[in-house]
Image (cartoon, rainbow, N blue to C red):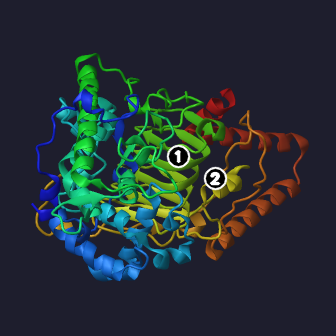
Amino acid sequence: MTEEQDLIDQSPPPSAPDPETNPNPNPNSVIHPRRVSFEHGLLPIQKLVFTDPIQTLAPVKQKLADAASNNRVGSAAVADVLQISGDHARLVLETLGSVLHSESDPLVRAKPEEVDSVGADLRDLILFLYIQSYKKLLPRTHKDSAAVADVWPSTSAFDGYLSALSPIQLVRSNSRRFMPSQADDEAHQLSYLQKHLANIISLLAEPVEGEESLVLSMEAFEHLAFLLQFGDKGSDVSPLSQSTPFFANSDPDMPAVPVPASQVHEWLLQNIATALESITERISGKENGPSNASDQDDAMSDACAAPNKVAPSGKGPCLIEGVSKTSLVKQASDLRGRSVKVVNCHDSVIYLLAPLRYATVHGCSDTTIVLGAVGKALRVEHCERVHVIAAAKRVCIANCRECVFFLGVNQRPLIVGDNHKLQVAPYNTYYSHLEEHMSEVGVEPTINKWDKPLALGAVDPHDSLSHPAGVADAQAETAACVDPDQFINFLIPTWFSGEEIGSTKDNPFPLPDAYMAAQQRNLKSLEETRRSLRETPLEENRKKELSSALHVYFKDWLYASGNIRQLYCLQGD
């Protein structure tokens, strides 16, 4: 234990809050972990994973502070202090920028060419580096493990060492009951923060001159909003300091008096203990009750609990789960400004034509998923034979097989984990509001790094699993580019009702020359076939026979490909 931590952690944490201490001035507001930091902010770079974060990060913080300008650290300093490559240092800044809690931070607003020089706030960077030690919650064991093992092949490029990292068998068991639920994940993240809170506060606190104690300013305290937030499900999140008894109602024209770090520590522990107790009761109630596929966690209850239902007034994440052998359409009126999770969907086509913050595609197979514009981050994990079409700021692909990604992406696609036979291609579709949605969330059509994937480790150091020596250093299998002659445009039907027609008339991302040339060759070939059919000298009855034969073959193709189902589903909506 460091001296700083010892100054904070002088008394044992309370097991439950004392009601008379009024740990929260707003009794209707509950503390939550800020889940996007844990879901989209972890990087499988071994040099960033510290076995003893406080012992390592205290000197790292000092070195970064020495290299900082106006308390901000650029990529060159990050690379030098952390002893990582320039590419990885930029990746650190880009990833941090995608999960920052403050939309006004210069890193969030920086143009791509400015990221390296704008850099990150030292305090946010230190918290980001600290949580790289976080270990994700493992799926629970399925009671019928033999049946589940049948679902997914166990072989891998590392002779079975990474079989647990292949798109996990539990993901494919069609039962969320044996996977970490949202409540399970939230409890796990809160427990991690509870355990490490003294260390985290000590990294943000400052010593009092002439005294053996630490204090926390309101400005430093606000950086804890990277990890924690107050607010009911789906509600607007207020500044973290306004939920405290010691910073709330401070005069904005006067700097707030710093608070002893031990007081902040105790108050946060009390709130975390209360939240954990509530989550534990909720989880216990579900486990003791009947299993119900529509029984979602409270944190998600304002979202679309059923695949075809979205609460129009909700602001929380939307969960689309268990869509099978059908087509589903959600538009801006359903999803604008929200985050989306698409989980365990199979043999379907899903259109999410909206401006989104974060998106996760998890455990899907044989499905095409069209995402409108994702302004923060898209993560695709544990999927098989999935086609993802997305315009996004950044994309991470983890533990997928035989998937194809048609991307308009502003940052290099990140590929991690045990992947096999992945393909990437330029973005290949549009809908009438696409450019409007891209502009709304900040996706640039002039920058597309679809063909510059960055492959990191094949083993995720955050997965709580142990791995044989040497495997941790292996690099993930990267993605191949789709052959230009195999590249085709994807047509989004225009008959969806309830939306005004927008201004987008074509794909906003310019196609590379090879793909444009291949497309022009295909169009030319199609025109020649049409002209040949028109000019073939046939009697009228023979023309009718030819037309009838073409319709029969086309109908056969619709049924054989499964697209006939999509036509019926979408026309019925």
The residue tagged with tag 1: helix, strand or loop? Answer: strand
Give above or below for 158 relative to 39. Answer: below
The residue tagged with tag 2: helix, strand or loop? Answer: loop
Q: Which residue is identified by label 2?
A: 490
Choose the circle earlier in sequence order: 1 or 2: 1
How busy is the neighbourhood of tag 1: few (under 14 within 10 Å), some, or many (20 plus)? Answer: many
User: Residue pushed farthest top?
Assistant: 290
- Residue 304, percent across and down? 50, 30
Quarter of the image holding residue 185?
Answer: top left
Residue at 26% x, 68% y: name it.
Answer: 48
Q: Is residue 68 left or right of residue 326?
A: left
Residue at 12% x, 63% y: name it.
Answer: 2
Give, as a three-letter code, the residue at label 2: Phe
Q: Which residue is identified by label 1?
A: 368
Quarter of the image holding residue 175?
Answer: top left
Q: Residue 213 or 64: which is nearer the viewer?
A: 213
Name the quadrant of the C terminus.
top right
Q: Residue 438 or 204: which is nearer the viewer?
A: 204
- Residue 542, percent across and down? 83, 43
Give above or below for 409 relative to 260. Answer: below
Quarter of the image holding residue 290?
Answer: top left
Q: How many numbered callouts?
A: 2
